[in-house]
Every structure is written in C-alpha cells, then in structure tokens.
Image (cartoon, rainbow, N blue to C red):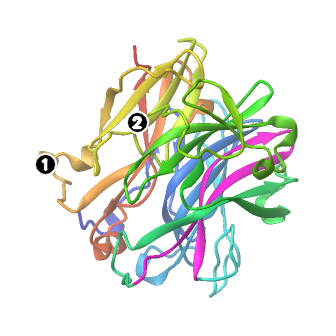
Amino acid sequence: MGASSEQTAPAKDVATGLSFPYEQGWLGADDAYSIPIGKGKSVWLFGDTFAGDAGNRDRNKTTMVRNSVGVTTCVADKACTIQYFWKNQGTSKPRSFFDTGTDAEWYWPMDGYLDGDTLYVSLMIVRNKPGAGPTDAFGFEIAGTRWATVKNALSSPDQWKISIKDLTQKDLWPGSSIVHDGDFVFFYTQASQGEGKGYMIVMRVPAKKIDSPEKNFEYLGNDGRWHAGLPKGDAQHVIDQAISEMSVRYHPSMRKWVAISPGIEFPSKRVIARTADTPLGPWSHPQDIFEFPEMKPSNPIYDKDTFCYATKEHTEFENDNMVLTYACNSAVIAKVMNSLDLYRPQVVVLSVPK
C-alpha cells in the first residue's frame, strides 16, 4: 500500500452519501457498528481510533484511543455529515470515549440498540497478551464483556451520561449482533474456545429487564428450548463459526433475516450472507456476496500483509439494496501508520442476495 496522505481521499459512496472523512482530528478507525437514532441520524461505534489535532494528516502525530463515537446526519440527495467524539478531544492527552480509566485494559464496542432515548451497548474488555510487543498486530486477548447504558442518547455524545456494569466472563462475548424483536432483546454471542475458535449461540433478555441483562439471561439450548442463566456447553450452535463482529438485520423486501460476516477462514478475502425466516435461524448455507478488492493480488493496491474484516450491514441507509462497511488493516504496524488507504470504514453498496 504505502500511499501518502496527500494522494488519499476519504472513503465515500455516492449512492448513499455516507462517508468517513479525516477531519476533527479523527484519522481512521475500525469496528463501525451503527445504531439509528431517528431523523436521519445514526450513532457509530468505532474501535481503536487514531486521534489527534484538527487538521493533522499524519498518524504518527496522533494517539490511538481505544474507541470513539460518531454521529451521522443524512438528508435526502445530499452527502451525510459526521461529528466525531472521544474524551479530552482537542487536548494533548486524548482518551477513549468509553474509558476504563486505565491503560491495562480497554473497551472495543460491539453492537447496541436504542429504546426510546436510552442507548445500550455491549463492550468487549480487551487487554494485552502477556509478552506482546507494541508492533504485534494480534497482541491482545479478550477478558470478558460489560454493558453500557446511556440514558440521554439523543443528546450530543459529549453530554452523554454513561453507566457501565459487568456482563460476562472471557468465554462468552454477547453483542456480536443485537436484535430487539418483540418482547425480547437477542444477543448473538460468540462462545469462545480459544483464539480464533468457537461458535455462535443466541442469548436473550426480556426487553423490560434490559437494564440488568447479567441477571436475566436465557440461552437457546440444544433441545430448542430457552434455559435460564448462562450456558454450560449445552447451547445450540446457531452458526458454526466464531464471529466477533457481524450483523443480523431484517429485510422487509425479502421477508428474511440476513446475517453478514466475513468468510469462515481467517484472514478471509470475502463477505458472506446467510438468510433465515427468524432472527434465530435456522440459517441457510453461506453465500459469497463480496470480495475485498484490497486482498486481490491482481489489484494494484494489493499488499501481502493486508487483511480485511469488520463486515456489517447498515439497513438505515438502504432502499432496495444492501449497504455494508468493512475495514482493512496490516500485519505490519508501520504500513498502517503511513498509509491513509488503510484502517478506515469502507462503504459498499450491493444488490440484496437472492
């Protein structure tokens, strides 16, 4: 890769008007879950973020905060605008928007949902692997999850009142995707069996008890029934793939639920879709719907160290199509630091799979 910042334009898709410009000191991030909050607005949840001074275009002059937030405002036939937020923004000591208060562990946001003016977000707890160095792209491990509640989510994020509580231990990661359907909130959850290994289960909480999900979890068992508490190896494998980031969303035009994720292999060169009649499945066989151009050897921008991930769907930006985002990273940290072509949400518009 290695393109200079002067040659790089921010990711943008003319079909949706959605873009993630390098401005306000924000110089790239991954993750990119979106939650619509009404009136053409969406909250965006980003993972590790290059945060610096407004006008700066050099990642080497930024601090990596562990998460940030954006709010897009979209008007028909016009480009969307976005405002970015993190703590201590505009100072020499920026901090993550969702901050643990320590550098020993941090949060990567997972999915969330809005109920009235209250936003709920699942947060993955992350820490450095023992012995990992600063240039190790995979030198982290998951320590569990926590549950963030924002009671005034329709206010500007710099005014949010956030409370955070423990959710699960390191072997269960609820919130890869969250679906509020009827009287329940469903959590697509990775049951981890070690690094890169595991499968997806579904847990649920009554919507009226969502302020304390840790006390009210049920899980879908192998017997097809719901069981109180956390699973003990007896949960149904809803999807036989370990997926830390995905989306499960309903498509009225298809009358189907669609699950979007990277391919089963890692690193994967493709995005796959599964469909189902209910948010719980059973899911169809995966269908390839997109190949990451950055990972095609025939592409002039190809680099052997680049890998892409973080695929999600954003139905609030759709008409009769699918709007996805993904991000690309590099196993060589120096390439990320020196190429603004890497490490930002890329927008893709696709036809709805048949």
Instruction: Say which residue appears at 26% left-offset and 65% top-offset.
Output: 3
Residue 181: % across, % down? 72, 26
| Residue 107 part of the magenta segment | yes
Q: Nearer the viewer, mark 1 or mark 2?
A: 2
Instruction: Say which residue appears at 42% left-offset and 45% top-offset.
Output: 242
Amino acid type assigned to the residue bearing label 2 in the image: Asp
Q: Main secondary structure of the magenta part?
A: strand
Instruction: Tell me where residue 167 sits by quadrant.
Output: bottom right
Q: How busy is the neighbourhood of tag 1: few (under 14 within 10 Å), some, or many (20 plus)? A: few
Please name the residue that numbered disc 2 is placed on: 240
Left or right? Give the position of 330 relative to 349. left
Amino acid type assigned to the residue bearing label 1 in the image: Pro
Image quadrant where one finds the N terminus: bottom left
Residue 350, compared with residue 125, is above or below; it is above
Residue 41: % across, % down? 71, 41
Left or right? Give the position of 128 relative to 279. left
| Secondary element at tag 1 | loop
Q: Earlier in the sequence, mark 1 or mark 2?
A: 2
Instruction: Say which residue appears at 50% left-offset and 31% top-offset.
Output: 238
Instruction: Say which residue appears at 49% left-offset and 47% top-offset.
Output: 245
Image quadrant where one finds the C terminus: top left
Residue 317, compared with residue 97, is above or below; it is above
Residue 120: % across, % down? 75, 49
Most extreme residue toward the left, as rendered?
298
Residue 310, compared with residue 255, is above or below; it is below
Disc on res. 297: 1
- The alpha-carbon separation of the residues under discs 1 and 2 comes to 29 Å
| Secondary element at tag 2 | loop
Q: Nearer the viewer, residue 345 or 76?
A: 345
Q: Are marks 1 and 2 in contact (CB under 8 Å)?
A: no
